[in-house]
Amino acid sequence: MRAEIEKYLQEHLPEEACGLLGGENGMVKEMLPVRNELRSAVSFRMDPAEQIAAMLYLEEQSLEIVGIFHSHPRGPAFPSETDLKEHAYPESVAVICSLADGTWEIRAFDIQEGRMQEIALIFH
Ligand SMILES: [Zn+2]
């Protein structure tokens, strides 16, 4: 699962890539890619139609949205100020994938009202 995510992120360099992680009880079982409609190296916004399609798919599979991921091709493995401000789904974890040190580092954060707490993610 991790390898699949890293491959997807890698293919979209130098742009930020994003999508949903589906699973159960904090365990990631599926990655649903969603187009970054900003096509930017420093920011992302999920294509709304693709995001809804991914959410419906997870619902059909009886899977939860474990996390919403996006990459930081050159930034650190922490949510940026913008990430903290714009995290629209407090019930979902923000997953940040950073390539700043040359290998992908994937970390997950629970963001509530602009405050973050790191949590553990388990990959199937
Ligand atoms: Zn970010």
Image: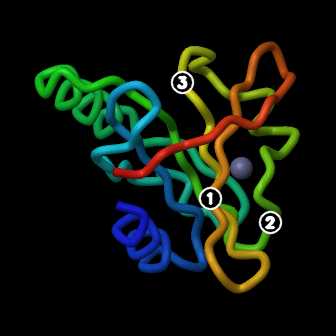
| Residue positioned 80% across, 50% down in the render | 78
The secondary element bearing badge 1 is classed as strand
Q: How far is mark 3 from mark 1, CA to CA?
A: 16 Å
- The tag on residue 17 is none
In this figure, which residue is indicated by the disc labeled 2?
Answer: 75
Q: Amino acid at mark 2?
A: Gly
Residue sitting at 53 percent across and 47 percent down? 69
Quick one: label 3, few (<14), some, or many (20+) residues within 10 Å? some
The residue closer to the viewer here, 53 or 8, is 8
Of label 3 and label 1, which has the lower sequence position?
A: 3
Q: Position of residue 85 (x, y in %)?
A: 80, 27
Question: What is the three-letter code of the residue carrying label 3?
Answer: Ser
SS under mark 2? loop
Give the image location of residue 114, x and y in percent: 84, 22
Q: Amino acid at mark 1?
A: Ile
Report how far apart the C-alphas of labels 2 and 1 lie in the structure: 12 Å
The reply to whether callout 3 and callout 2 are in contact (CB within 8 Å) is no
Residue at 40 percent across and 76 percent down: it is 7
Q: Residue 14: which quarter of the image?
A: bottom right
Q: How is the image coloured?
A: rainbow
Q: Is residue 57 left or right of residue 24?
A: left
Between discs 2 and 1, the one toward the N terminus: 2
Judge from the rendering whether residue 87 lies leftward or rightward of residue 30; answer left or right.
right
Residue 108 place in picture, x, y as percent: 65, 42
Q: Is ligand 1 closer than 8 angstroms to the Cβ of mark 2?
A: yes
Disc number at residue 106?
Answer: 1
Residue located beneath label 3 in the image: 92
